[in-house]
Image (spheres, rainbow, N blue to C red):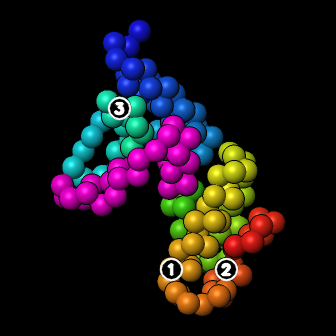
Amino acid sequence: MPDHPSDARSVELQTEIDRLAARLGTTPMPVGMRTNDGLNVFVDDSGTYHFTFYERGQLGFDHAGTLEDLLYWYAQSIVTDKASYISDRKDRFRYEYDVLSGLSPEWAKRRVRELAAKFRQWEPGVARPDDLNLLPDIRESL
């Protein structure tokens, strides 16, 4: 039995990471092993889940959220990496959507929403950027 609540969360997180990695056909990453060069997943003392990346000791990003958020970020990063070899962007986004849908339909929709937001940031002031046409139809307004 873990001594600290975040230890129990770390055990649960590792179990879920292992499960997702098996479903995605990849090697699971260790929870809690923090490095200064690479991806890190951990639970802090307050119980917040972190999906963090460092390059040469410099923080690249630190996404902090719930267990569900972290599992989404982890799965999405693996799926996006696998999809990066698909040259046609529309096919790439469809692949990401299909694989994430197999894990969680909500994750698939979340990815499409995030891409749509990114496309809008790239073209501020444009009502409907052309890149939105590359995204799978999730039956909601993007």
Q: Amino acid at mark 3?
A: Ser
Q: Position of residue 139 (x, y in %)?
A: 81, 66
| Chain-order first, disc 3 or disc 1 | 3
Image quadrant where residue 108 sits: bottom right
Quarter of the image with the C terminus is bottom right
Quarter of the image with the N terminus is top left
Which residue is outermost to the bottom? 126
Q: Could you tell me which secondary element the residue under label 2 belongs to?
A: helix
Neighbour class for label 3 at 10 Å: few (<14), some, many (≥20)?
few
Looking at the rendered image, the disc whose residue lies closer to the viewer, 2 or 1, is 1
Closer-to-camera residue (78/63): 63
Specify whether residue 117 is painted magenta.
no
Which residue is outermost to the top? 1
Q: Amino acid at mark 1?
A: Gln
Looking at the rendered image, the disc whose residue lies closer to the viewer, 3 or 2, is 3
The disc label shown at residue 132, or none? 2
Q: Residue at x 57, y 72 (%)?
A: 117
Q: Position of residue 20 (x, y in %)?
A: 58, 39
Q: Could you tell me which secondary element the residue under label 1 belongs to?
A: helix
Instruction: Write down the residue under mark 3.
Output: 46
Vertical placement of residue 64 versus 45, above or below: below
Image quadrant where residue 4 sits: top left
Q: Is residue 136 visible?
A: yes
Vertical placement of residue 96 versus 11, above or below: below
Specify whether residue 63 is painted magenta.
yes
Marks 3/2: CA–CA distance: 38 Å
Q: Is residue 25 visible?
A: no
Instruction: Write down the residue under mark 1.
Output: 121
